[in-house]
């Protein structure tokens, strides 16, 4: 990256870090079960709910306990279940129309990050009815109170139940962008392990690796605080202690609960300390090829960590200690290598490969441009890279020709 651009990026990031203690971050209130939601909805003066989910979640019957609780409390609800992985502007438009048609006054994002992001984006459009989502992309462009927003994660990975971001794909251009503002942080996060019990092993793995990526990128960045470092370390510890169990024994309620809390802690960490190039590259792959976000993060994470090199060895050592694979006596380079190797071993155990079959070489400059545009100057990464330098990661992910 050119020296002047590096100076600009680091200055931008430093200003944000200084401002961090003064920004209106809030932590969603944790709710242990969906059965508690009717009283919360009533207490907030709401009376009609739009539940935003996807067809797979609904077909598994995961929304039934919530539906039964709302029915028993005489709270009318409507369900929008057409959300796709990497939700689009069309999803938001359709859900918003349902919200208005049924005179709703509360939103529940029920599912993975896609459903929660869709719910946030619907909330943003309700708060600013005259403004398009494209006009709200970037930072601090919503700045108006949303309707009551509740997040019910069915995967332990995205952390979207804690964050100020909604990631949306333009249905026409397939450009994926983030809307970031404090009103998008859900008021309540329902960490109910029972809604995650039927999650298939591979989705359990990739979403768990998504949470790990959040924690790692938040921890190794340059805008951490004592609280975000503590949250990231807790998330890493819980993931290393519970993800393998949740993968092999999906009905283990304790492991599922611990993974939900890991995702929550990781979300709290990266909401304030941001992520890095793993996410920027993964978002471009999701937008262009619809690669699931957790899968893209899992594939990329060791590649990017290795590229950062010794600049992150000391930080990776702390993560390795939290993961139980190093001690204080372990030299930093050795601990860092052990941590990266442990991630690679997790990928092998979970059947996660190292390539993305859909990548077309002709798309790489455009994808790298998108990643560069998302990450720089916002993400306080350990080592700055421009679009040309980011291209190498896409080439790493291309399958070898026969």
Image (cartoon, grey):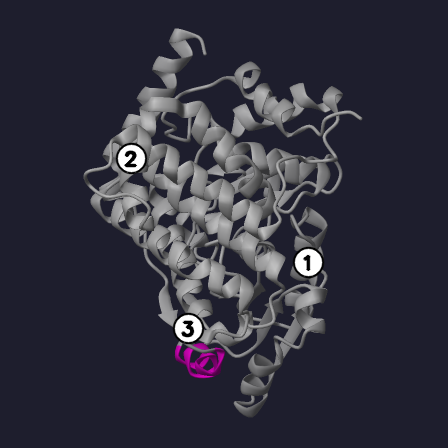
The x and y percentages for residue 364 are 67, 22
Q: Nearer the viewer, mark 1 or mark 3?
A: 3
Which residue is the site of mark 3?
254
The x and y percentages for residue 4 are 39, 8
**Start and end of the magenta stretch?**
34-43
Q: Is residue 17 magenta?
A: no
Which residue is the site of mark 1?
83
Q: Residues within 10 Å of mark 2 (few under 14, many from 20)?
A: some
Q: Is residue 18 above or below residue 4?
A: below
At a point 65% along the width and 40% down the height, the residue shown is 286
Find the distance from the CA under tag 2 to the CA under tag 1: 37 Å
Q: Residues within 10 Å of mark 1 (few under 14, many from 20)?
A: many
- Quadrant location of the C terminus in the rendered image: top right
Find the distance from the CA under tag 1 to the CA under tag 3: 29 Å
Pick the residue in front: 139 or 56: 56
Q: Which mark is residue 314?
A: none
Q: Earlier in the sequence, mark 1 or mark 3?
A: 1
Q: Is residue 28 above or below residue 175?
A: below
Find the distance from the CA under tag 3 to the CA under tag 2: 29 Å
**Left or right position of 146 against 351:** left
Q: Earlier in the sequence, mark 3 or mark 2?
A: 3
Residue 168: which quarter of the image? Answer: top right
At a point 36% along the width and 51% down the height, the residue shown is 236
């Amino acid at each position: 990256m050119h020296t002047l651009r590096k100076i600009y990026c680091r200055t931008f990031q430093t200003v944000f870090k200084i401002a961090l203690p003064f920004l209106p971050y809030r932590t969603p209130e944790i709710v242990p079960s969906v059965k508690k939601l009717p009283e919360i909805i009533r207490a907030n003066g709401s009376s009609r709910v739009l539940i935003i989910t996807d067809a797979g979640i609904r077909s598994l019957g995961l929304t039934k306990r919530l539906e039964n609780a709302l029915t028993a409390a005489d709270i009318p609800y409507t369900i929008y279940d057409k959300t796709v992985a990497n939700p689009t502007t069309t999803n938001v438009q359709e859900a918003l129309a349902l919200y208005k048609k049924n005179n709703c006054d509360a939103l529940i994002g029920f599912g993975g990050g896609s459903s929660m992001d869709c719910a946030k984006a619907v909330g943003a459009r309700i708060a600013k009815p005259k403004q398009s989502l494209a006009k709200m992309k970037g930072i601090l462009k919503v700045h108006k109170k949303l309707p009551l927003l509740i997040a019910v994660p069915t995967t332990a990975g995205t952390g979207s139940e804690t964050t100020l971001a909604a990631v949306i794909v333009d249905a026409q251009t397939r450009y994926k962008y983030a809307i970031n503002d404090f009103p998008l942080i859900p008021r309540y996060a329902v960490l109910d392990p029972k809604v995650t019990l039927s999650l298939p092993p591979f989705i359990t793995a990739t979403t768990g690796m998504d949470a790990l990526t959040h924690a790692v990128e938040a921890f190794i960045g340059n805008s951490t605080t004592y609280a975000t470092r503590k949250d990231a370390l807790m998330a890493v510890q819980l993931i290393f202690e519970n993800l393998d169990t949740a993968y092999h024994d999906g009905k283990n309620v304790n492991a599922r609960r611990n993974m939900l809390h890991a995702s929550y802690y990781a979300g709290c960490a990266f909401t304030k300390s941001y992520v890095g190039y793993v996410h920027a590259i993964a978002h471009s792959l999701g937008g262009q090829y619809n690669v699931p976000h957790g899968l893209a993060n899992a594939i990329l994470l060791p590649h990017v960590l290795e590229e950062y090199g010794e600049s992150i060895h000391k930080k990776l050592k702390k993560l390795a200690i939290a993961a139980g694979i190093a001690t204080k006596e372990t030299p930093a380079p050795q601990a860092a290598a052990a941590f990266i190797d442990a991630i690679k071993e997790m990928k092998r155990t979970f059947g996660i490969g190292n390539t993305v079959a859909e990548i077309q070489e002709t798309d790489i400059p455009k994808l790298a441009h998108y990643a560069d545009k998302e990450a720089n100057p916002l993400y306080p990464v350990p080592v700055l890279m421009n679009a040309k330098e980011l291209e190498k990661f896409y080439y790493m992910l291309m399958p070898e020709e026969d």
